[in-house]
């Protein structure tokens, strides 16, 4: 079976999972963390190299303050309490997103998670947090413009390869497969640049119910795709 090197996931459906059980949405998010732990463990064991997950978008700040607060607390807890487990599993964490607008306390948690896991290389786990694809591209354009203005780069040197270096993903390989759970069929501002040639897999399964057998279905579907990159 052809295994993708880089899988990205839009973890959608936590709220609906909770609604279906007449539980507060927060229960869905908590179960969502368990689903993520299952998939991280599986990827590490199966030799998948890179996993990128969409944890919190630039648009998610518009949710009710209580839910935003809960999500931030949950992620903070996950990445402090579970950090030793992640280190043991050889996971290297990288945050993709705009950390500059976060509180110093919150930024420190993400930076500590990155620093403590930086020497690991079994599984690269990228967490898209305060991430938006358009925000990422405009930020990159701004950085490049600054560099051109200061004489560090010429206009002719702005190639696709050069541009990509200024994205949050830097030199990380583009995702081969992007999975979206929760039955919606849209990109939601996720990896707009990097997904140019990614294969998409959509499933109605709500994220908290996503398990190894569902993940294997996505991998099996991917292995049957013929990637042509615009060729015939
Ligand atoms: C989408 O479900 C999910 C999110 C906005 C948050 C994703 C977060 C987690 C899975 C938990 C924490 C993650 C980490 C990295 C520790 P939704 O709320 O949009 O669900 P709905 O579409 O059913 O309302």
Image: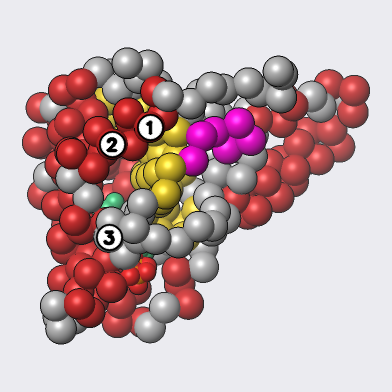
Quadrant containing ligand 1 reads bottom left
User: Does the magenta segment cover residue 131?
Assistant: no
Q: Give the image location of residue 142, x and y in percent.
A: 74, 46
**Residue at 21%, 36% in the rendered image:** 40
The N terminus: image quadrant: top left
Q: Secondary structure at mark 1?
A: helix
Q: CA distance from mark 3 to mark 1?
A: 18 Å
State the residue position of label 3: 206
The C terminus: image quadrant: top right
Look at the image and give the residue range highlighted in magenta: 195-200
Q: Secondary structure at mark 2?
A: helix
Do callouts 2 and 1 mark residues in contact (Cβ within 8 Å)?
yes
Instruction: Give the number of the disc on residue 217.
Output: 2
Q: Give the image location of residue 78, x and y in percent.
A: 17, 52
Q: Secondary structure at mark 3?
A: loop
Q: Is residue 51 above or below residue 226?
A: below
Nearer to us in this view, 38 or 143: 38
């Amino acid at each position: 079976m052809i295994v993708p090197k880089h899988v990205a996931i839009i973890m959608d459906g936590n709220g609906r999972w909770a609604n279906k059980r007449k539980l507060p949405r927060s229960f869905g998010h908590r179960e969502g963390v368990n689903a993520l732990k299952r998939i991280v463990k599986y990827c590490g064991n199966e030799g998948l190299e890179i996993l990128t997950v969409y944890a919190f978008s630039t648009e998610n700040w518009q949710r009710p303050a209580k839910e935003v607060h809960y999500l931030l607390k949950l992620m903070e807890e996950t990445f402090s309490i579970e950090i030793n487990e992640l280190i043991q599993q050889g996971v290297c964490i990288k945050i993709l997103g705009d950390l500059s607008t976060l509180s110093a306390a919150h930024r420190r948690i993400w930076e500590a998670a990155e620093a403590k896991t930086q020497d690991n290389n079994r599984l690269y786990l990228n967490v898209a947090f305060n991430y938006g694809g358009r925000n990422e591209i405009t930020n990159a354009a701004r950085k490049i413009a600054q560099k051109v203005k200061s004489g560090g780069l010429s206009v002719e040197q702005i190639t696709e390869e050069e541009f990509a270096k200024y994205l949050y993903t830097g030199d990380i390989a583009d995702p081969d497969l992007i999975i979206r759970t929760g039955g919606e069929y849209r990109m939601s501002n996720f990896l707009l640049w990097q997904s140019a040639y990614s294969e998409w897999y959509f499933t109605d399964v709500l994220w908290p119910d996503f398990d190894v057998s569902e993940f294997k279905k996505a991998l099996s579907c991917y292995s049957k795709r013929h990637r042509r990159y615009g060729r015939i």
